[in-house]
Structures are given as C-alpha cells and as structure tokens.
Image: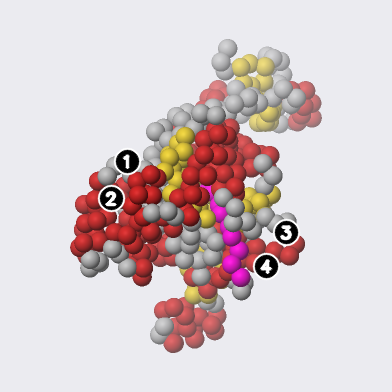
Amino acid sequence: MKITTVKGTNDYLPREVAIRDYLQSVILRTYQSYGFERIMTPIIEDIENLDKSEGGENLNLIFKVLKRGDKLQKAIDSGDEKELTDMGLRYDLTLPLTRYYANNRAKLVSPFKVIQMDKVYRAERPQKGRLREFVQCDIDIIGTKSSNAEVELINTTANALMNIGINNFRIKINDRRLLKAILLKAGFEDNQLDSVCISFDKLDKIGAEGVKEELLSKEFGEDAIDNLMKVLEDAPFTLDKAKAYVGEDESIESLESIMSAVESISGGKYTVVYDMKLVRGQGYYTGTIFEVESPDFRGAIAGGGRYDNLIGKFINEDVPAVGFSIGFERIYGILLESDFKIPNQKKKIAVIYDADDIASALKIADSYREEYDVALYERIKKVGKLIDKLQNAGFDGFYICNQSEELKMFDE
C-alpha cells in the first residue's frame, strides 16, 4: 500500500534533490557575486501581517492555522469565522521580507540588497506546474527609488538564468502607473482599477473576449471596456503608442531608461520588450513590473516588480523597494523531464564489503574519495540485485572487496 503525500507536495529522490541543490547553489552563488546577502524568515506569519500585504488573489490561498486551547474555544463560541485563526503560512517571500526590514532596518546597509531562497505555501487546487509547497528564489533591493535598482535586478537575474543553462529568453516589462494611466484614459474610474487589473491579468488564459465578458459581468462602463479592447487590438502596442495615448508620463521615461540600460548590458544575449498586457497578480506592485519568458518553458520563469508602499504598512513611512523572483519549480520540472545532467558532477561509486571487514572497506573507500563520491554497502546473497539497484539509482560504478579488487564502471 502506498502512503500518499498531501496533494500539491512532493517527495524527492536523491537524484532529484541533487539537481535541486545544484540549481539553487548556482543561483545563490550568482546572487552573492552581485553583492546580495541572504536572510531567512519563519514560514509562519501572524495572520494580521499576511492580511496587510495586498497580495491580490493570493490572500484567498493562505494556509491558515487555528488558534489553540481556550482561545480556539472562545473563537468557536463567538461564531465569527475570522476569529478562528491567528497565524498562516507565508504564500510568498515578499511579505516576510517587509516585516523583517521593518524590524531590522537600523542594522542594515541602505540600500539593502537581499537574497531569499525558501519554501512558500499556497492553498490552491493542485495541477501540473502548480504546487501547494514550492521554492522561490528572490532578490530584492530596498531603500532606493532609482530605476537603476531595476536594471541591477534584471542583470543579476538574467545572469543567474544563463549560469544554469537557460539562454533563450526575453524579459517583458511594464509599469503599473502606465497601465493605470491607460485604463483611466480608456474611461475606467480610479476606484475600479484594481478590479480591472485582476481581470486583465487573465488575458493569456481566457483571451480578450473572456476579459471583456468578465469586465461586463462586473458592470463596468461599456465604453471604457470597448476602448480597452481597441488598445488590445492595436498590436504591437509600443511605448511610442502609449505616449501618444496618455501623453508624457514619468513611468514612460522610467521604462525607456531601464530598457536602454538593459539593452546595453545584455550584449544581445537576451532582449527586453515593453508589454502593456503585463499585469502581475500581486496587488502590492506600485511601479515597474517584469517577467521572463522562454519558448523552452511553459509560462513565465521569473517575475517581479516595485512595491514602494508595502513596508509602510508596518512603519509610519514608505520605503521604496523592488524585487525579482526566479520560478524555481517550473525550471526544475522542465530540466528533470529533459534528463538534465549536472555539469562537472563528481562520479559516484559503491564499495561492497563483507560485514566483518568494515575497517578494510573504509580504507578502500577513502582511497577513492578524492576522485569519487563513495558509499559503502554490505554484501548480500544476491549481490547482482544490489548492483542493478545501484545502477538504477545513478551510481557510476562499484568495487567488491575480497573479490575482483578492482573498480568497475557501469559505462565500460
């Protein structure tokens, strides 16, 4: 009988863990080489902190933790469902970072350049490519409004992707301020923009007609919806067209500056393009937003943006911040399917020994450790079955003590 894992979570075999460790180590080394420093935060946050985050639809996906003991009983007696929980699992790494910064800012260099690589949790319906427990690899710069921070994040992330072997990609960029200016020009009201953005973010999934139907169901003005559809039909909607549509705007100048710098440093290895359809689902984004896409992968493989107002929810001042996150699980999944081999990986061998001669076996194993990773296994009656399992598990060879007295490689 198989004991199942919780849907949306995975156990990982040693070979799978080795690939995950390799990818994370390359990403981490790249981040660190660009001057970012790693921190860690708890996976559990106070529910009131999670509710402050403006995480968009992600707020509906929080794994909530029930109160305990007398507090739980009082909450049950109150009849108020909201009183039942007091904590929740983090659904991204941005909210914990803002709390961390609010508590520790006096000890940190400004601007603070930070790495987070850890698990997050979302209570959504599991499906292929969508897990309840998954790893995010984030870098953020906190404490500067300069668009140079965006350039630095894009450059660092692009190099991390190339260092793990992803070379065919492009970066899509937009600005929430420009998107909202376009929506206002189309005729939507300011208090409607967040709801419009939630629908607009589904464009790739349900198409323009699907977005139109959803906006109509929300009873927004038909003229505004028609005007937005006309903008979508005017493809490609370039920055020049955006400028002609909304007039001079600070967000356009910022995008032009970022794109010019990125094109200069990329050396043609990757491209950056303006995409007015890019929204990003999190409600806390206030300015620049970006995603990385590749024809070799389904969906975005990295994304992020500027969130200048989020830290202010914890302290009485707004602190500018911008971050970029690599979609680790999507990249890992595709590489695993493609039979990815870890570059320059040390070969792994097994030393098979008699139970009464562990000392000799250890000496033999130690003599090979400089060149190989070596594991010891006691000899069993059907040693051939053991050797077959070792080969299937990814071992490269074996040595049987008191028998052949030589190392045999499986590929020979």
- SS category of the residue bearing label 3: loop
Q: Nearer the viewer, mark 4 or mark 3?
A: 3
Q: Note whether residue 157 is visible.
A: no
Residue type, label 4: Asn
Q: Is residue 59 left or right of residue 314?
A: left
Which range of residues does the magenta coloring cover? 317-325
Up-down relation of residue 160 to residue 134 (above or below): above
Answer with mark 4 or mark 1, whichever residue precedes in sequence: 4
* Disc 1 to disc 2, C-alpha distance: 9 Å
Which is nearer the eye, 265 or 19? 265
Q: CA distance from mark 4 to mark 2?
A: 44 Å
Q: Residue at x 42, y 35 (%)?
A: 294
Using the numbered discs, state the Cα–Cα distance from disc 4 to disc 1 in whole angstroms: 45 Å
Q: Residues within 10 Å of mark 2 (few under 14, many from 20)?
A: some
Of the image marks 3 and 2, the number of the one nearer the N terminus: 3
Q: Residues within 10 Å of mark 3 (few under 14, many from 20)?
A: few
Residue 262 is inside the magenta segment: no
Residue 401 sits above or below residue 275 on the image:
above
Rendering coords of residue 157 (x, y %): 56, 41
Q: CA distance from mark 4 to mark 3?
A: 10 Å
- Expressed as whole percent of the image width and height from the top left, the position of residue 26 reads 62, 37
Marks 4 and 2, the one that precedes in the sequence = 4
Q: Nearer the viewer, mark 4 or mark 2?
A: 2
**Residue carrying label 3:** 108
**Residue receiving disc 2:** 231
Mark 4, residue position: 103
Give the secondary structure at mark 2: helix
The numbered mark at residue 236 is 1
Q: CA distance from mark 3 to mark 2?
A: 44 Å
Towards the viewer: 72 or 169? 169
